[in-house]
Amino acid sequence: MILANIVNKIFDFFLPKKTPPSVRQFLNYLICGGVATLADMSVLFVFTKVLHLNYLLAAAVGFVIGVTTNYALNTALVFKSQGKVKKELSLFALIGIGGLLWTELILWLLVKKFGIYLMIAKAIAVILVLFWNFFMRKRFVFSSQPNLEDLEKSLQ
């Protein structure tokens, strides 16, 4: 909660008083995503440039680090947990896997087909996948409506 209070005080200082809560929520999501992306991209960089692993494998490992960081920060700053951590984390990760599949496809297309530098391709993928992750997680993982069960049923 200390972290949430600090972020809210910063927002209070920089944002107009009439900023809608949904805008603040999305800005918090961007901050959490930025930190998680930094963790993800750092792993990608180290694994490809230092350890010389395949970039698709390195992106998958980076994803695991990023999604774990993202969940922890999101439950602290962005979304209200329903107290069902196992379900939330599972669905959070499942939606993230969907994002990972989008990321892998985008990386493959941009790197292999268009010859774009890996880190630039990753930044493009992050921007494109950001909206998928936010709206899916808001709707199915952290909604005040009973949507956890809806998503589970649709996946069976």
Image: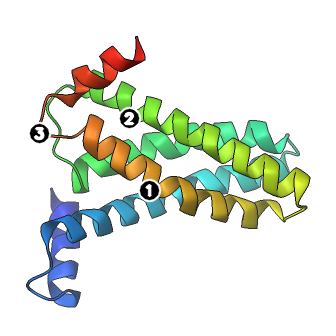
Q: Where does residue 140 sit, x and y in percent of width and height?
A: 28, 35
Identified by mark 3, the residue type is Ser
The residues bearing labels 2 and 3 have C-alpha atoms spaced at a distance of 15 Å
User: Looking at the rendering, in which quadrant would you find the C terminus?
Assistant: top left
Sequence-first disc among 1 and 3: 1
Q: CA distance from mark 1 to mark 2?
A: 14 Å
Residue furthest front in the image? 154
Q: What residue is pinned by disc 1?
A: 131
Between 65 and 124, the residue placed more toward the observer is 124
The answer to whether any part of residue 124 appears in the image is yes
Residue count near mark 3 (Cα–Cα under 10 Å), binned few <14, some 14–19, many ≥20: some
- Which residue is denoted by mark 3 in the rendering? 144
Viewer-side residue, 113 vs 87: 113
- Say what secondary structure mark 1 lies in: helix
Q: How far is the residue under mark 1 from the one under mark 3? A: 20 Å
Which residue lies at the image location 38% right of the left edge and 25% below the top edge?
Answer: 90
Q: Earlier in the sequence, mark 1 or mark 2?
A: 2
